[in-house]
Amino acid sequence: MRVTLITGAASGLGWQLARACHARGDALLLTDIDASNLALRVEELGAERVQGLAGDITEPALHQRLVDTCKERFGRLDVLINNAGITHRSPTLRTDPVVFRKVMAVDYHAPLELTLTALPLLRESRGQVVAIGSMAGWMPLLGRAGYCAAKSALGQAFEVLRAEIAGHGIGLLMVYPSFLDTPIDRNALGGDGRPADHARSTIGRIRGADWMAGLILDAMHKRRERLFPDRGSWLASLLWRLAPALYYRKMSQRFAGEMT
C-alpha cells in the first residue's frame, strides 16, 4: 500500500488531495497547523489508514516527527506532497518585514527542509516528491512581493533538487497553478500581519481545488516533472519574458486595487 504524506491537509487543495489519494487506496499521514479541523478530516476519512499530526510546518522538530511517524505507523513513505502555503496582499513599501519572513518560512524553507528530512525513506521506496509552486514564481504580481519571491525560490530549489535525487530513483513533480478557490487567498495576510482587508486581484480563471487535485494525481501517476494547469497564466508568464513593458501595463491595470 502506497503511503502519502500531505502538508496543509485540513482544507483547500491539501484536503482535496487527501480525499483523492485516499480514494485510490493510499495510507495517509496528514498535517496542518489547524489541529481541530485536521482531526475532523481524519475522522471523516477513517483512522484505519489515516493519521493526523498537527503542528507548525516551519518547525524542524515537526519534520522529524512526521518522518518518524511514517516509519513507525506505516513502515515506509512513497509520496511527499508539499502543499502547505501562505500568502499576503500588501504593497511592498507598506509591509512589515515580519510578513515577508513568515511567507518565506512557510512557502520555501519548510517544504525544502521537510523534503530533505524525508529523503532517506523516499530513497528506500524510490518514491516521489510533489511541490505546489505558483505561476507567481514566474512573473511579478503587484502586492505579492513576498509570495512571488518565496514561490520563485521554491521552484528554483526544487528544479535543482530534481536532478540531484534522480539517481536515487526519486521523482519530483513541480506544480505551477495560478489562482485557485482555496483558503490560502481568503486567509491572506495584510502588510501588518493581520488578515488582508481587500479582495484579491487575479489573472485568468479561478479554478476549484478538486479540479486541481485531479490533475496533480494524473501527473503523479505519469511521473511527470512539471504541471502547468492554466494555459492563460502560462501565456501571461511568456508575455512577461517577451514583452515586459506590456506585461507591466496590463498588470498595473488589473492589480490596481492592491495598491490601496
Image (cartoon, rainbow, N blue to C red):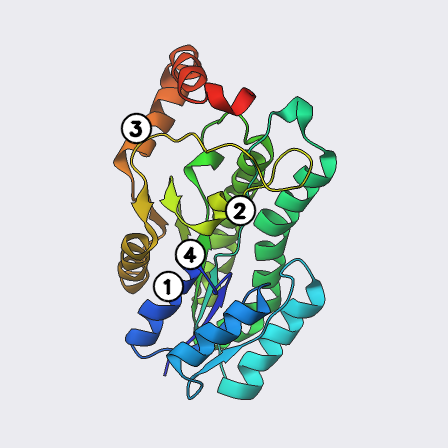
Q: Amino acid at mark 4?
A: Gly
* Along the viewing direction, whichever of 116 and 36 lies nearer the viewer: 36
> How far apart in space, not on screen, are marks 3 and 4 (Cα)?
25 Å
> Helix or strand or loop: what does disc 4 sit on?
helix
Q: Residue at x 63, y 44 (%)?
A: 104
Q: Residue at x 69, y 42 (%)?
A: 101
Of mark 3 and mark 1, the one earlier in the sequence is 1
- Tell whether label 2 touches label 4 (CB within 8 Å): no
Q: Amino acid at mark 3?
A: Leu
Res 251 quadrant in image: top left
Instruction: State whether residue 150 is above or below residue 252.
Output: below
Of mark 3 and mark 2, the one earlier in the sequence is 2
> How far apart in space, not on screen, are marks 3 and 1 (Cα)?
26 Å
The residue labelled by disc 3 is 235
Query: In screen coordinates, is 60 left or right of 128?
Result: right
The residue labelled by disc 2 is 187
Horizontal and vertical percent position of residue 102: 67, 46
- For residue 221, the mark is none
The residue labelled by disc 4 is 12
